Amino acid sequence: MTDQRELVAALRAAVRGEVDFGVTARALTTMDASNYRRVPLGVCAPRDADDVAAALAVCREHGVPVVPRGGGTSIAGQATGTGVVLDFTRHMNRLLSLDPEAGTAVVQPGLVLDRLQEAAAPHGLRFGPDPSTHSRCTLGGMIGNNSCGSHSVAWGTTADNVRTLSVITARGERLRPGPDWAGAPEGLRPLVDGELARLRTSFPDLPRRISGYAVDALLPEHRADVARSLCGSEGTLAVLTEAELTLVRAPRARALAVLAYADESGAAQAAAGLLPYRPLTVEGMAADLVPSGAGLPRGGAWLFVEAGGDTGAEARAAAEAIVRAADVVDALVVTDPARQRALWRIREDASGTATRMPGGTSRTKSGGGSEAWPGWEDCAVPPARLGAYLRDFRALLAEHGLRGTPYGHFGDGCIHVRIDFDLLTGPGVARFRRFSEELADLVVAHGGSLSGEHGDGQARAELLPRMYGAETVALFERVKGVWDPDGLLNPGMLVRPAPLDADLRFSALPREPVDVKFGYPADAGDFSAAVRRCVGVAKCRTTSVSGSAVMCPSFRATGEEEHSTRGRARLLHEMLAGEVVTDGWRSTEVRDALDLCLSCKGCRSDCPVGVDMATYKAEFLHHHYAGRRRPAAHYAMGWLPVWLRWAARTRTAGAANALASVRPLARLAKRLGGIAAEREIPRLAEETLSRWWRRRRQSATGEGRLVVLWPDTFTEHLSPSVGRAAVRVLEAAGLRVALPPTLRLPSGGRRVGDARSRSPLSLLTARRGRVCCGLTYLSTGQLDRARAVLGRTLDLLEPVLATDAPLVVLEPSCAAALRTDAPELLHDDPRAARLASRVLTFAETLETYAPDWAPPAVNRPVTGQTHCHQHAVLGDGPDRRLREAAGLTGELSGGCCGLAGNFGFERGHHGVSRACAEEQLLPAVRAAPQGAVIQADGFSCRTQLEQLGGVRGRHLAEILAEELDRRP
């Protein structure tokens, strides 16, 4: 029995990198992107090869297993283990050298693939293999799994692109494997020499044979390549510390031929016939995985066939030749790089998208459902047999009553699919095993490999005898014995494997529903199902974003797994499991991880499976602080609508501004309110939007279509100029503007009214109030208060909801709260859904209700940032079209401003808040051309720009209103 304290002390004495056996570190590494969960003892982040050797020596002395881990995106369970996890992403993540003349690069195992591609690109080079997780998977993980990617038809697998490796064995021997027996451990060559006949006859000849050890790479005719034989060994033979890789020359231009077929079988049968045209990719996917409006040619399945050339014309000609040679229903050739990237994103997100299948609800104890899982997403057959294999595969699914959506590398005969296994019940798990055994036999019957890219891990290793036979699998065990005689490296994988139906990550979750406040409609009200949405593909771990993408700003600011969406989901999973995180909703580890979540909702749209960490955070904070004192910021900023309304009612905004300008008083107020000392307290408007509206002495005047302008807290009290500008523009567009009622009238009072609503017959019994979306209560997890506020808002809005008038919400975060949070929190009140359906943004209102109105011609460049909630929940299509109609040229940046409501104001968040702003927003503003308009529709975004950038951002309504006022 290992004495954990002695182990930790020995590791800390021997290793210069971090050694962490705490709750958070262990919880973050219980799972990878597979169905499996194993709890490690702790995590060690070595700084260099000497640290790796030292950690191995300590673990060997204590008899503790070691699991090398990169990005944790493995899909077969090979990045999980019960011993010490070696995390190479923290320190051993560098590109050591790049030789453009030789076309080689030397990398450390924790280097993310995209970082290598970025360094190689200026030289016209790239690393050939490119898995869909290229933005976060590591080179060490790719070597461990022998990863491939979409370009393998042109550039092969990772093994095809490895020259030499530097490894350390479990017994501390440092070797440099390469061709001609270089770096072979003692005993390996005699073993191979005695098995030459078996090695020449027992291994299927197909491009995607990843299963088992690549012992046949040690044959004389294959140059006895020890480095190649280690590729795909899943960290079970030696620990990688360095790799010399071969780079390929990238084509100067590319064209993408999108070939449409009636169904996936037609696409599969056609794929092999395209290989003589030497394409760069032959990727296939069916309509099940393609979002509506993707712009693909008509059909039920598609091949993405990429062609390259020295010029754009040459690449296009090659793509058009492929189209002519293909027997297609329809086709499209795309040469625009941005459009190509958009199409490739559909394919790259498939591993997550396929996890949530249309039809049904999340699987529960009663069965039936839309959750689909990996485990058999990775078989490969000879490309010429792919069509026949897919037909047999579909028949087997039907026989077992299962559903799945195949996609993947059709040109290599490799199919990915997520299947709706029931992994929560005993009968469901038994069916999972039966199906796995029968599918393994089917793959072998077609001359295939159980794994075509992702490795065997725990998912398939148990079934390797069906593919190779008992004698060859015994040979694998002997190879393992030569490299790792003590069995310390990643035990349970590949040889002497754990059962494929053991250690399932779902088994630790509670079987009964968890009592929660939100309705989780996409997960049938089951919080556990919402949490297990995260399958670990780790798109949230990307270190840069492109276009308007947002997720996950806190991870990009800190680089820490616990501040990624996946990391937080893992902690919530372990909180529900109760084994590692043992104090449930009171967990300080979960609280601390969620503390830096900006509630930007970027994951809601950018995560392939729609994890909504902002909602999970609000839920957690509600339970965590139930019956306890909250942080000061929750009272100061969570109750902001109350304080601002009080200041307006007592007409003390001017006095508050004067006091806030006195630095000692401001410091005291910030200290008491939990506000960051670096922040300036925003100035209150001395005239609120509602007061200005009453001063106009009009109520819903005019003859146009009625629209109700929502006086959100920020527009009402902090930036009423935005509201005044919106009224100016909406009325110029011919619309009739009103504000919501402020009195709840008794039964029969159906007047929509405005901020001066009166009912002469019922003033004595009417209840006064202000509408509010409850955003500040939601973001601080004060969900009972949020429900009460939203309930009163629905009462006030009954006259509005009785009409067909839309609600125009100017603040994107408030619009998002009304459109999504309100109906999910008040899932038992049908009025909340009706309210959500009425919410429109400023641009949506003009596009829907004034389609013939021409905005004023601003004719200036625009810069700024699309609000994160706009991107994640509302969509910005109407805004783009309105800007274009107004002559506002240029694109807004993505990401998050970093202020994000109360987040950036809270004490302890200023550094992360500034880092988020410096990622895209502030650089975009600094690089803006002279005379550019700075657009920022959110109050937080404008405040961040003013306080950190010294510039004034304006809402789109203000930009248009200002131009209207310039007209004669």
Image (spheres, rainbow, N blue to C red):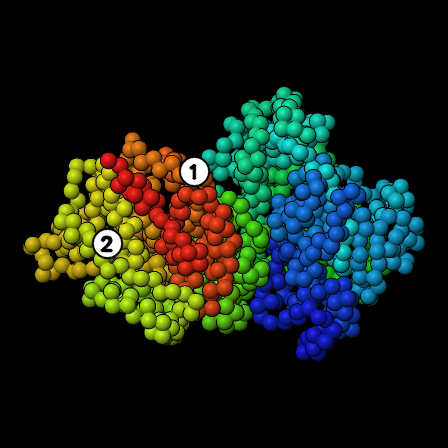
Q: Callout 2: few (<14), some (14-19), or many (20+) C-alpha neighbours within 10 Å? A: many
In the displayed structure, does residue 390 sit left or right of residue 586?
Answer: right
Image coordinates for residue 348, horizontal then vertical, percent: 58, 43
The part of the image, by quadrant, that contains residue 101 is: top right
Question: Distance between the Cα atoms at labels 1 and 2?
Answer: 30 Å
Residue at position x 70%, y 60% in the image: 92
Q: Amino acid at mark 1?
A: Thr
Q: Amino acid at mark 2?
A: Leu
Q: Is residue 438 above or below residue 788?
A: above
Image coordinates for residue 296, horizontal then vertical, percent: 52, 31
The tag on residue 889 is: 1
Residue named by callout 2: 689
**Residue furthest toward the left?**
761
Quadrant (top left, top right, bottom left, bottom right) of the N terminus: bottom right
In the displayed structure, does residue 777 sit left or right of residue 424?
Answer: left
The part of the image, by quadrant, that contains residue 51 is: bottom right
Q: Are marks 1 and 2 in contact (CB under 8 Å)?
A: no
Residue at position x 52%, y 47% in the image: 608
> Considering only order in the chain, which callout, 2 or 1, is on the residue closer to the N terminus?
2
Asked which secondary structure carries label 1, the reply is strand
Q: Is residue 764 above or below residue 326?
A: below
Image coordinates for residue 506, horizontal then vertical, percent: 56, 58
Residue at position x 46%, y 49% in the image: 925
The tag on residue 19 is: none
Give the mark toward the camera: 1 or 2: 1
In the displayed structure, does residue 886 sit left or right of residue 49?
Answer: left
Residue 537 appears anywhere in the view:
yes
Q: Nearer the viewer, residue 953 or 881?
A: 953
Q: Nearer the viewer, residue 592 or 317?
A: 317
Quadrant (top left, top right, bottom left, bottom right) of the C terminus: top left
